[in-house]
Image (cartoon, rainbow, N blue to C red):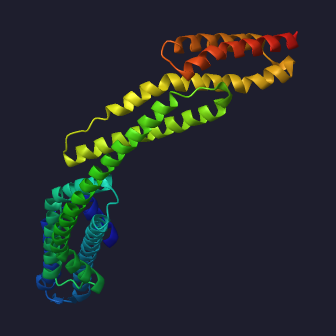
């Protein structure tokens, strides 16, 4: 019955002052039972001993009071532990070293969230102090753990505020460091783009269909580097936004891409043909799809014809040689298939 009473009380969601009043009521009830009547009541022919009944009623009231205090103590201790755990997690998070601008920005935003929760933390500690007052006023004996945990929790606001100030100071230094780093990285990117532009310009002068494997390898390398530089440009622009700086444009990337595209297409087309040629020449011919083969030839012819309008120099010579090479390979292969 005692456990059921406490559980019902907990489920009802009573306010702290109501719990305090119930604890006081039960204490008064135990005293009131003793004062209600004498331990022995004399009648004309008999004497009624009420001491056992009085003791049982008083003991019941004290049991209920003790159980209610134990429940309040356990709930209070669990809440205090949750608050302390939360504080420790917050400080551990704030003490992390941001490895880059994005981590620094995330930590700054995290601090903003925590500072917005300070009033909530204060309210939880204020409530805990009130519960402590109820338990202390009821002369409830706290465990050493619960008592130490409570006082540790009460010290946390000062520790947290001190930690916030320290982290803000560290973030100022990180902001300066990463802003300086960004400027250096942007200078390096501009230099790399200039070098890549020079390499692409040189690549656009290369011909010689026999070097197709080397050319396609160069195309892959140039594309990979250009893509990486484009990603870096986007990253640096995002970091400029974090620092509140004007966004830097990188028109060189688009210009390099436009310059490279027709030459890359030429050599990729040549490479595709050269990969197909051994099968055309050596078979097995029964596995060659003549319709697909003819479609590839038509696609290559049309593609290189369009490229002729935008190429010049040695690459244009490759454009002129390529259809002849394709036609010869196609004709020989078809003859071998028949």
Residue 332 sits in quarter: top right
Query: With 29 as the anchor, is 98 left or right in this view?
Result: right
Residue at figure coordinates x 36%, y 44% from the top left = 191
Residue at figure coordinates x 69%, y 13% from the top left = 324
Residue 329 on image: x %, y %: 76, 16
Name the foreground residue: 10 vs 272. 272
As drawn, 212 above or below 23? above
Residue at figure coordinates x 11%, y 85% from the top left = 35
Query: With 331 as the anchor, is 106 left or right in this view?
Result: left
Residue at figure coordinates x 65%, y 25% from the top left = 209
Where, quadrant-wise, is the C terminus in this rendering?
top right
Query: With 71 as the anchor, is 161 left or right in this view?
Result: left
Name the foreground residue: 28 vs 250. 250
Residue 301 on image: x %, y %: 63, 11
Residue 95 sits in quarter: bottom left
Residue at the far front: name it: 313
Name the foreground residue: 338 vs 155. 338
Residue 160 on image: x %, y %: 19, 70
Q: Can residue 326 be seen in this view?
A: yes
Name the foreground residue: 318 vs 306. 318
Q: Can residue 1 be seen in this view?
A: no
Where, quadrant-wise, is the N terminus in this rendering?
bottom left
As drawn, 159 above or below 332? below
Residue 336 on image: x %, y %: 87, 14
As drawn, 289 above or below 27? above
As drawn, 220 above or below 312? below
- Please state the total of marks drawn on the protein image: 0
């Amino acid at each position: 019955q005692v456990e059921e009473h406490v559980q019902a009380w907990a489920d009802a969601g009573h306010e702290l002052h109501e719990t305090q009043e119930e604890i006081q009521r039960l204490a008064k009830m135990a005293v009131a039972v003793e004062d209600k009547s004498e331990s022995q009541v004399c009648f004309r022919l008999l004497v009624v001993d009420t001491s056992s009944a009085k003791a049982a009623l008083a003991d019941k009231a004290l049991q209920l009071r003790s159980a209610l205090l134990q429940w309040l103590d356990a709930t209070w201790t669990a809440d205090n532990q949750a608050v302390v755990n939360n504080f420790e997690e917050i400080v551990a998070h704030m003490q992390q070293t941001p490895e880059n601008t994005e981590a620094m920005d995330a930590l700054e935003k995290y601090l903003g969230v925590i500072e917005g929760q300070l009033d909530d933390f204060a309210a939880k500690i204020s409530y805990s102090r009130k519960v402590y007052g109820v338990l202390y006023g009821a002369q409830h004996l706290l465990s050493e753990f619960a008592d130490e945990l409570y006082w540790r929790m009460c010290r946390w606001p000062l520790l947290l505020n001190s930690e916030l100030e320290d982290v803000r100071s560290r973030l100022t230094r990180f902001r300066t460091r990463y802003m300086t780093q960004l400027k250096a990285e942007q200078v390096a990117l501009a230099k790399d783009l200039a070098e890549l532009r020079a390499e692409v310009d040189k690549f656009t002068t290369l011909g010689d269909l026999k070097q197709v494997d080397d050319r396609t390898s160069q195309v892959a390398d140039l594309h990979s580097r250009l893509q990486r530089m484009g990603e870096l440009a986007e990253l640096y622009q995002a970091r400029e936004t974090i620092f509140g700086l004007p966004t830097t444009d990188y028109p060189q990337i688009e210009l390099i891409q436009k310059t490279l595209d027709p030459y890359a297409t030429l050599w990729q087309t040549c490479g595709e043909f050269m990969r197909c040629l051994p099968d055309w020449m050596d078979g097995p011919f029964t596995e060659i799809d003549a319709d697909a083969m003819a479609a590839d030839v038509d696609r290559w012819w049309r593609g290189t014809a369009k490229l002729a309008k935008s190429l010049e120099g040695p690459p244009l010579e490759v454009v002129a040689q390529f259809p002849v090479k394709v036609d010869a390979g196609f004709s020989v292969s078809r003859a071998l298939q028949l």
